[in-house]
Image (cartoon, helix red, strand yellow):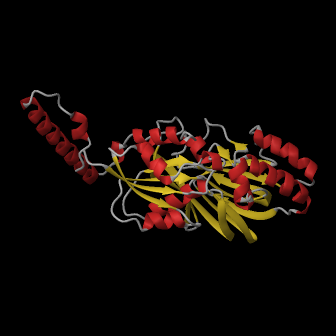
Amino acid sequence: MDKKKVLLIVNPKSGKNKNRASSSEIAAKFGSDNYEFDIRETTCSGDATNIVKNSIGENDMVVCCGGDGTFNETINGVMTLNRRVPIGYIPAGSTNDLANTIGIPSDIDNAVATISRGNINQYDIGLFNNRFFSYIASFGVGTNLSYSTPQKMKNKMGHAAYMINGFVLNLVPTLQSIKPKHIKIEYDGKTLEDNFFFGSISNSTSVAGLFKFDKNDVKLDDGKFEVLLVRRVSNPLEAFPLLGKIKRMEYDGDKIIYLKCTNIKMTFDEEIPWTLDGEFGGNQKEIRFSVLNRAIDIISDPNPMFIGPAEPDFESESPEEKEKREEKEEKKLRRKRKYKSKDDESDEEPETQEAENIQE
């Protein structure tokens, strides 16, 4: 059996120091019998994207080891390729929100085992103007914590570093001086205009490990993202009950607005900074978001967070589409018969699954 060609991208600075493994150690956990690795380590921001773009040869899959930002860069690289390439993810960041939602284990051994099993789920990603993001785009209070928190602090303390840096050292002392942003929001044919302290557009049950969504209401391949908007508060004392409401998922439609949509346009009075998957997304005045339904193949175990492929709607297909479909099905049937005939001659069971998977 031919070995699978794997592009392995490792961010050597992600995660807590004590939990890190070297690139060669990660590759060794897969074993050498079934995989052939092209190992690359990132050295700067945007490196993972360029590694994927410039990878030599056709890889059977791309595996990235790092935080949500590394995964974001990997997606942006994969989306430039002229074919679908499955992505395996070994989470090694400080919060790993996306991995927690998808059900990818946070320890390396179990993450590798998940990738080795090879189950594919199709995952929605977002388009932020001309840049892709995997699970979260946000603005406002606290959204710069992931990239403003010192890397050494994150490596030593993990998720606790965000809490200390954000809510103790930065958020509480400066809350009185923060001004809400005036926004015109157009989404799925509707318009909302007001002042907001915070906003996020996400495809996850968790944002920054702090804000949660009902797992029964979020699906990772439904073509919709969840939008959370927090209106202004008049003083710091009002902020803490508001955070409590967010933690309890109490979205009252007044101070906290919760929407589900496919397309959204936000227009601000001035340029404001955005965060994409934990990394700085630039200063933007007008942003257009859209959901790219099932745009990437992610390697993860079966998960109720995914709806799965929809049943084909044969009733609405044109005569030409019906003819092509029936011709394709007839070719598959002939192939199955051919394999069955060969297997019968050798007194072996027919490998119908293999025949099913043959590409036309």
Q: Is residue 205 left or right of residue 309?
A: right
Q: Which residue is found at the position 43% from the left and 46% from the top?
A: 28
**Residue situated in front as seen by the camera: 273 or 29:** 29
What quarter of the picture does the N terminus occupy? Answer: top left
**Residue situated in front as seen by the camera: 33 or 220:** 33
Q: Position of residue 19 (x, y in %)?
A: 61, 45
Camera sees residue 119: no
Q: Quadrant of residue 181?
A: bottom right
Q: Which residue is found at the position 34% from the left and 43% from the top?
A: 315
Q: Position of residue 116 (x, y in %)?
A: 41, 41
Q: Position of residue 99 (x, y in %)?
A: 57, 44
Q: Is residue 341 left or right of residue 112?
A: left
Camera sees residue 313: yes
Q: Position of residue 135 (x, y in %)?
A: 59, 52
**Residue situated in front as seen by the camera: 44 or 68:** 44
When the figure is inspected, residue 50 is found, relative to residue 213, above or below; the finding is below
Q: Is residue 6 left or right of residue 14?
A: left
Q: Is residue 55 left or right of residue 212?
A: left
